[in-house]
């Protein structure tokens, strides 16, 4: 690490500690040439995820859109926001861990539905009805029947 004061290329680490809830590491360093101290931050490099929409367009993955969709599905339900944020974090981590940099909205929607089903069945059906674009009441009833059959 180059010293910001004298430009010397070597320094020693005096102190390291997690920062931002463990997402980064804060390091206090001392230049071996001028003995001045400075702070560096080490973060995990994350590659951007691209979502391929139904119309074929591409968009950068946005976790806030994911949370907003779940919030709408959970309207007037007793699902705390931290639960939805945790679901969004899990999905983002799963996507980051995958080798693919591009993901379809269908796959993201399936991931959301799988998790929402365990949290709140009504929210799950609401999300599924928008996501799967139920065309008629029969399609809606088929989805409800699946849920009821899985309960037994």
Image (cartoon, rainbow, N blue to C red):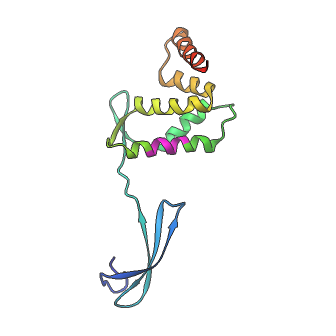
Q: Is residue 74 magenta?
A: no
- Is 143 on the left or on the right of 76, as rendered? left
Residue lying farthest front? 152
> Which one is in front, 71 or 37?
37
Q: Which residues are magenta?
A: 87-93
The picture places residue 32, in percent across and down from the top left corner, at 35, 88
Magenta: main secondary structure equals: helix
Q: Is residue 151 visible?
A: yes
Q: Is residue 89 magenta?
A: yes
The picture places residue 94, in percent across and down from the top left corner, at 43, 42
Q: Residue at x 55, y 10 (%)?
A: 137
Q: How many marks?
A: 0
Instruction: Please say if 59 is above or below 147.
Output: below
Residue 127 figure quarter: top right
Q: Residue at x 56, y 34 (%)?
A: 70
- Is 71 on the left or on the right of 108, as rendered? right
Q: Residue at x 38, y 46 (%)?
A: 97
User: For the C terminus, which image quadrant?
Assistant: top right
Instruction: Please say if 33 is above or below 14.
Output: below
The picture places residue 4, in percent across and down from the top left corner, at 37, 81
Instruction: Please say if 58 is above or below 150.
Output: below
Residue 119 figure quarter: top right
Q: Residue at x 56, y 31 (%)?
A: 116
User: For the N terminus, which image quadrant?
Assistant: bottom left
Residue 11 figure quarter: bottom left
The picture places residue 36, in percent across and down from the top left corner, at 42, 88
Instruction: Please say if 116 is above or below 43.
Output: above
């Amino acid at each position: 690490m180059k010293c910001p004061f004298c430009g010397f290329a070597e320094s020693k680490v005096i102190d390291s500690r997690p920062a931002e809830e463990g997402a980064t590491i804060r390091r206090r360093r001392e230049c071996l040439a001028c003995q001045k101290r400075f702070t560096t931050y080490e973060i995990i490099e994350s590659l951007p995820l691209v979502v391929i929409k139904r119309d074929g367009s591409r968009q950068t993955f946005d976790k806030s859109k994911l949370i907003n969709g779940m919030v709408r599905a959970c309207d007037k339900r007793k699902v705390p926001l931290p639960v939805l944020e945790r679901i969004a974090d899990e999905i983002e981590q799963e996507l980051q861990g995958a080798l693919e940099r591009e993901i379809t909205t269908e796959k993201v929607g399936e991931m959301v539905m799988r998790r929402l089903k365990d949290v709140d069945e009504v929210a799950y059906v609401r999300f599924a009805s928008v996501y799967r674009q139920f065309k008629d009441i029969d399609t809606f009833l088929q989805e409800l029947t699946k849920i009821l059959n899985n309960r037994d």
